[in-house]
Image: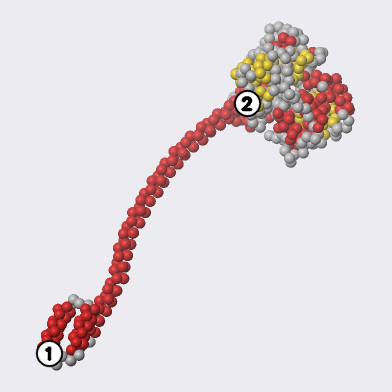
């Protein structure tokens, strides 16, 4: 088991302001008149709506499905009617609108049928557990919103040595994880065991900052209750940003997550305590993720934590905490170090909302009345940077919009923790410069991608035109070729016929000649065989006359007659001779 702790570089000690919101037990926030649920409450593709306006839905019913692998479904936080599907302000620093499903609660808070897997989660295959977690819409509740089922799928070759449960909650003012660990420690341990089984992790470490004694005690008790499950509670020093994933992993294991790598590449998975409690709810009770603990703090009359249905307006929460203590100057979603100032007070709570911080000018540490002065190159910013960057250089390059140079200085390794900003004596809003530079780089990338796509489209269009031209030309060529071949074959057949004729003639001519020669030979033989009658001396006159007539007739017929006729004549003569005898 891991007992030794490691100190990461940099970090700052900041006033905590945590006690003000931990005096009251967590209560469920009231169901509002209207719930506005953005389709994008997580990292990845926005969910795809499954409902229509006017449709009645039950609590826990899936109203939008995950659209792709990196996405998460959304479930109705209470029963009611779908009032609208359209664009509404979402919790984003730009104040943009995005597609939301609006539910008008019916007040019954009636659950849909749920399926529990409590008795047999150990019998379930890790992939089946992931499917339940995925269909329950669970995403990282620490602020990132990464779909948990993906995190639970390290791949067949990777062995997860250590599962770290992140209960550090290092940012000032925020106490929702602290309260969760105090109040739901058993559920968290159950969720941890399920996650351990899903990941087949060898050991678990629950990391909690030493400024949360009550949470530490409760978690230790819960761990002891569940027996030896290779789970330890690790109390880490309070220093910001100890709860940042890479810094926490280093503190616990002494291992550094490789550049452009993930924790699972070093056999570690880090999960927020809220996410783990949601895993428990999904597996043991079949309940999808529809609410979370949210800290409402700063300049409000009663800072506290509430269990809030997603889609509830931030304004409603402030009202439930007695309202603000003055005119609201800034509304921050998240903590004072890494949170974003919002432009509207009506934005809804979503899965990643951990804190609503109200700045009405009453709390000194929240006041933003800074007077920026020139950089004095003191180097304090570099001293506190937990990821070994050179914040001063990043600032200069951001200011000069030298986007290539700023990338060479690894701007994307910046976790926007705000430590540099916090210590800068010139009060330069360094993180704002970095965020601006990052957004410009993304914009440039998007423009490049767009122009690349446009160029690809254009090139493909040109290619298609060329290809069609070539195909046409080829068809024409083939047609011409076919015509030529036909003509040639016609000519060939003519000449063949002629040739055949000639050959026939050649064949026939010798035959004719042979026939004629044979006929000539027969004639000549006949001439040779011509017999002069020797028995005509004693003929009577009548007989002589008859013979003369026959000779004359024969003479007449000789040239035109055949052998047959000659035979006939011979026969005639024979007849006469026969008569004479
Ligand atoms: S801390 Fe501020 S003044 Fe000092 S080097 Fe960094 S940016 Fe400049
Ligand atoms: S905001 Fe970025 S540059 Fe500044 S200290 Fe944090 S990680 Fe370093």
Question: What x and y, as percent, mark residue 195?
Answer: 78, 31
Q: Distance between the residues labelled 2 and 1?
A: 139 Å
- Circle 2 sits on which residue? 48
Question: What x and y, as percent, mark residue 148?
Answer: 72, 29
Please, is residue 500 above or below residue 331 in the view? below
**Tag 2: Cα neighbours inside 10 Å, few (<14), some, or many (≥20)?**
some
Pick the front one: 251 or 372: 251
The image quarter containing residue 419 is top right
**Tag 1: Cα neighbours inside 10 Å, few (<14), some, or many (≥20)?**
few
Q: What element carries label 1?
A: loop
Question: What x and y, as percent, mark residue 503?
Answer: 31, 68
Please, is residue 401 above or below residue 83 in the view? below
The image quarter containing residue 496 is bottom left
Residue 540 is marked as: 1
Is any part of residue 402 visible from this angle? no
The figure's colour scheme reads secondary structure
């Amino acid at each position: 088991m891991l007992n030794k702790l490691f100190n990461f570089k940099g970090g700052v000690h900041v006033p905590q302001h945590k006690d003000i919101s931990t005096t009251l037990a967590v209560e469920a926030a009231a169901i509002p008149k209207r719930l506005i649920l953005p389709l994008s409450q997580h990292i990845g593709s926005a969910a795809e709506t499954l409902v229509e306006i006017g449709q009645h839905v039950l609590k826990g019913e899936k109203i939008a499905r995950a659209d792709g692998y990196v996405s998460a479904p959304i479930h109705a936080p209470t029963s009611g009617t779908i009032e609208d599907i359209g664009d509404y302000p979402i919790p984003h620093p730009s104040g943009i609108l995005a597609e939301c499903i609006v539910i008008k609660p019916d007040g019954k808070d009636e659950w849909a049928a749920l399926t529990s897997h409590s008795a047999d989660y150990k019998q379930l295959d890790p992939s089946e557990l992931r499917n339940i977690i995925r269909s329950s819409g669970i995403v990282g509740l620490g602020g990132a919103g990464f779909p948990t089922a993906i995190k639970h799928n390290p791949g067949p070759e990777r062995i997860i040595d250590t599962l770290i449960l992140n209960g550090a909650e290092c940012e000032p003012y925020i106490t929702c994880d602290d309260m969760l660990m105090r109040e739901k420690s058993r559920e968290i341990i159950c969720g941890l065991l399920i996650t351990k089984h899903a990941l087949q992790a060898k050991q678990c470490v629950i990391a909690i900052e030493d400024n949360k004694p009550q949470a530490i005690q409760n978690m230790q008790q819960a761990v002891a209750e569940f027996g030896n499950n290779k789970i330890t509670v690790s109390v880490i020093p309070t220093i910001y940003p100890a709860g940042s994933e890479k810094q926490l992993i280093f503190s616990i294991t002494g291992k550094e997550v490789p550049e452009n790598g993930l924790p699972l590449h070093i056999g570690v998975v880090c999960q927020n305590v809220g996410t783990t409690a949601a895993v428990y709810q999904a597996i043991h009770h079949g309940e999808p993720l529809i609410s979370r603990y949210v800290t409402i703090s700063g300049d409000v009359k009663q800072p506290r934590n509430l269990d809030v249905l997603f889609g509830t307006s931030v304004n409603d929460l402030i009202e439930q905490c007695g309202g603000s203590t003055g005119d609201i100057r800034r509304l921050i979603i998240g903590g004072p170090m890494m949170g974003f100032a919002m432009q509207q007070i009506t934005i809804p709570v979503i899965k990643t909302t951990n804190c609503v911080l109200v700045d009405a000018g009453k709390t000194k540490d929240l006041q933003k009345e800074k007077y920026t002065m020139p950089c004095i190159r003191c180097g304090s910013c570099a001293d506190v940077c937990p990821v070994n960057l050179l914040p001063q250089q990043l600032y200069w390059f951001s200011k000069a919009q030298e986007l290539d140079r700023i990338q060479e200085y690894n701007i994307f390794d910046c976790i926007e923790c705000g430590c540099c900003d916090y210590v800068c004596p010139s009060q330069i809003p360094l993180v704002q410069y970095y965020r601006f530079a990052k957004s410009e780089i993304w914009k440039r990338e998007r423009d490049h991608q767009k122009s690349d796509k446009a160029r690809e489209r254009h090139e493909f269009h040109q290619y298609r035109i060329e290809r069609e031209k070539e195909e046409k030309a080829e068809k024409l060529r083939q047609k011409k070729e076919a015509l030529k071949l036909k003509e040639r074959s016609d000519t060939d057949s003519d000449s063949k016929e002629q040739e055949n004729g000639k050959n026939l003639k050649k064949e026939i001519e010798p035959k004719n000649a042979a026939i004629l020669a044979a006929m000539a030979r027969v004639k000549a033989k006949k001439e040779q065989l011509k017999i002069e009658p020797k028995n005509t001396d004693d003929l009577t006159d009548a007989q002589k006359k008859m013979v003369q007539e026959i000779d004359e007739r024969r003479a007449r017929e000789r040239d035109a007659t055949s052998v047959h006729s000659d035979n006939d004549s011979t026969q005639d003569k024979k007849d006469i001779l026969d008569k004479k005898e």
